[in-house]
Image (cartoon, rainbow, N blue to C red):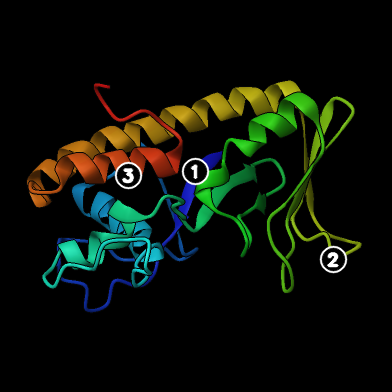
Amino acid sequence: MEPVLEVPAPDGFGLWPVAGTTPSGFLPLGGELSSAEVGTAVMAIAGCNDIDPDGDRPPRPATAPGSFLHGLLTFDDLFAAGGLRVTDHSTGVTFAPGCCDGLEDWRDWYRLADHGGLLGFGHDPVSPVAERCGDTVRLTVDAERSDSPVIELPASELRRLLTGVERDLAGFLALANVWAARYLPGHRAPVTAALARVLGLRPPNS
C-alpha cells in the first residue's frame, strides 16, 4: 500500500524544477523522492487548489510563485487528487484511486480497518470500493463489474499497511520542508504547514 498523487503533465511549468509524469499518472510519495519529484508533488497539490479567490479569501498576488500558491496557502479545505494504491504482487491486481478520491482523506482507511463500513472512490468508468466484511477487507477494483478483480486482506494487515503509509507521508513532508527552503525560501513555513494539513500530519519540528 502506498500513498500516490495524480500528477498532471508538467508541460510549460517553470516556477521550479519538476520531473516528468509516470506511465500510471500517479506519483508515489515517500522519503526517497528526488528533488524534482518533490517539486512535481508540490506542483500537483498546489495546482489542485489553484482556484480564484472568492469574497472570503484575500486577493491573489499579482506575481509568481505567490499567485500559483495562493489557493494552497489560503484555502481551509485543501484537496490533493490521489489516494492509496494497493498492489497484490501475487496476482498482479492493483487497486488504484478513483476519480472522487483525494489523498487528504487517507485516514478514512483507519476507520474502515477499525470499525468497518464501506469506502467508495469513484464512479463510471471505474468505481473502486473498499469494504470490511468480518475480519477481512475486500478491495474491489470496479464495483460496476460483476467480474471485477479484487484484493482481500485481513483487517489487521490493513492497519499495519496504514502505519507504512503514514511513515511514507512523513518522509515526503520532511523532504518537502527541505525542498521549500531551497526553492521557495520566502514561503517555506506556510507551504510546509499547508502540505502537512492536506496530508493530516504535524509539520516537521512542531
Label 1: which residue? 3
Q: How many marks?
A: 3
Residue at (19, 48) in percent of width and height: 35
Which of disc 1 and disc 3 is earlier in sequence?
1
Q: Quadrant of the C terminus?
A: top left
CB under 8 Å between callouts 3 and 2? no
Q: Secondary structure at mark 3?
A: helix
Residue 42 x, y percent position in the rendering: 29, 54
Vertical placement of residue 136 versus 23, above or below: above
Disc 2/disc 1 C-alpha distance (Å) = 24 Å
- Residue 48 in the image, given as x and y percentages of width and height: 41, 63
Asked if the residues shown at circle 2 and circle 1 are in contact, with their CB atoms under 8 angstroms apart, the answer is no
Let me know if residue 107 appears in the view.
yes
Locate the N terminus by quadrant.
top right
User: Circle 1 — which element?
Assistant: strand
At 34% from the left edge and 69% from the top edge, which residue is drawn? 53
Nearer to the camera, 105 or 137: 105
Count residues near mark 1 (Cα–Cα under 10 Å), then give few for <14, some for 14-19, many for 20+. many
First in sequence: mark 3 or mark 2?
2
Measure the C-alpha gap from mark 3 to mark 2: 36 Å
Residue at x 69%, y 24% (from the top left corner) = 157
Residue type pointed to by label 3? Ala
3 or 2: mark nearer the eye: 3
Q: Is residue 161 above or below residue 117?
A: above
Amino acid at the residue labelled 1: Pro
Q: Is residue 82 left or right of residue 184?
A: right
Q: Which residue is mark 2?
A: 144
Marks 3, 1: nearer the viewer: 3
Specify the label residue 194 is tagged with.
3
Q: Is residue 53 left or right of residue 59?
A: right
Q: Is residue 31 visible?
A: no
